[in-house]
Image (cartoon, grey):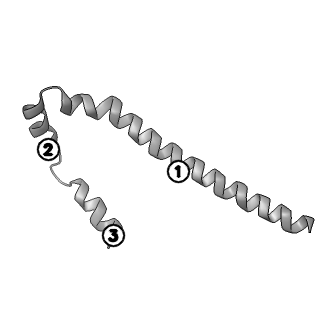
Amino acid sequence: MTIHNSIRNKAGFGLFSFALLAYGAVMGGNIYQIIVEVPNWSSDIPNSLISYRNSFHLTHPGYFFKALFH
């Protein structure tokens, strides 16, 4: 019985650790976007949005979602 509980505890700790790392990655990306990207495209709305859109020369976010969901 103690071996089963030990394996269950280790599996739970591993899943919790993975979830915590995934949450940290998502929050890190959000914080980066708020600090770096939002001021670039929210300062002069019409011109800054055109400039931000033109920065995607080779790829755009749609390629990520096409690869993710196919």
Q: Earlier in the sequence, mark 2 or mark 1?
A: 1
* Residue drawn at (78%, 64%) of the image: 8
Type of amino acid under label 3: Phe
Which residue has dot 2 on it?
53
- Cα distance in 3D space between marks 2 and 3: 23 Å
Q: Which mark is residue 22?
A: 1
- Give the percent coordinates (x, y) of residue 2: 92, 64
Q: Secondary structure at mark 3?
A: helix
The C terminus - image quarter = bottom left
- Give the percent coordinates (x, y) of residue 4: 85, 68
- Give the percent coordinates (x, y) of residue 63: 25, 61
* Residue drawn at (52%, 47%) of the image: 23
Q: Earlier in the sequence, mark 2 or mark 3?
A: 2
- Give the percent coordinates (x, y) of residue 54: 11, 43
The local crowd at label 1, few if under 14, some if 14 to 19, many if 20 or more residues have their Cα within 10 Å, is: few
- Is the C-beta separation of discs 2 and 3 under 8 Å? no
Residue lying farthest right? 1
